[in-house]
Structure formats: C-alpha cells, structure tokens
Amino acid sequence: MTTLAPNRRPSPQRRLELLAAAFAVFNSLRIVAYLPTLLALHASGHTEQHSLFTWLVFLGANLTMALWLHEQNGRRMNRAIAVNACNALMCGAIALSIGWLRWMPPATNLLY
C-alpha cells in the first residue's frame, strides 16, 4: 500500500541542526534566567531560601559537562561547551553571592 502524503521527516543532518539551535536557544535563556535570582539575593540580602549546596552541585554539573564536551570535541571549543561554561559561571556567581551574603554581611554604621 502506498501513502499519499510525502515523507516529511527532516534529514538526520537537519535534525541535528534543529537540535543544536534548540539547545543554544534554551540554554541561552537559562543563562538569562539566573539573573532574577542574583538580583533578588542582592536586593534582599536574604539567603535562607537558597541552598548553597544545590548551587554548588549545579556549578559542578555544568563545569564537568563543559570539560567533558571539550575533551570529546578534541579540545576544541564549540557552542555547547561555551553554553555549559556560561551556565557554570552563573551558578558560581549565585553560589558566591549566597556565601558572601551569609558569611560576610555588609558592614553597617562604619561612620560611627
């Protein structure tokens, strides 16, 4: 039996291109999505609702994924490595902010 509709499946190369584009878009948005957390931390100074352990795990996961991809890619950079490295950087910024605000509270009344 023949089908009337032509086969509309994209080629394997086109599917890879679409997946790479989706990866880049969603992970770039994820990098931007870290900003409200950073802004909220610094605006309020309250860190009790943020888990330092969780952000350190996210940092480690993103960093090791970037390093693993770098090795798998013959020690050459590509978009996936850059995105994971940026995610690691943002997770590190949040973890650093949590630690700083928790253990190095801003000095008040320095003028008195």
Image: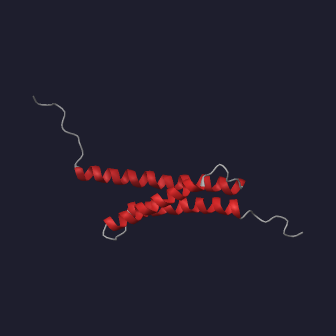
Where the N terminus falls, by quadrant? top left
Q: Residue at (49%, 52%) from the top-left corner?
A: 29
Task: Compare residues 11 and 4 and report the one nearer the observer.
Answer: 11
Image: 54 above or below 5: below
Percent across and percent down for residue 66 are 41, 63
Image: 26 above or below 77: above
Percent across and percent down for residue 87 are 49, 59
| Number of dots carrying numbers | 0
43 displayed left or right of 108: left
Percent across and percent down for residue 108 are 82, 64
Task: Compare residues 81 and 3 and report the one nearer the observer.
Answer: 81
Task: Compare residues 110 and 3 and report the one nearer the observer.
Answer: 110
Where the C terminus falls, by quadrant? bottom right
Q: Residue at (31%, 66%) from the top-left corner?
A: 73
21 displayed left or right of 5: right
Q: Residue at (85%, 65%) from the top-left corner?
A: 109
Image: 88 above or below 7: below
Task: Please identify the residue farthest to the right as the structure is shown.
Answer: 112
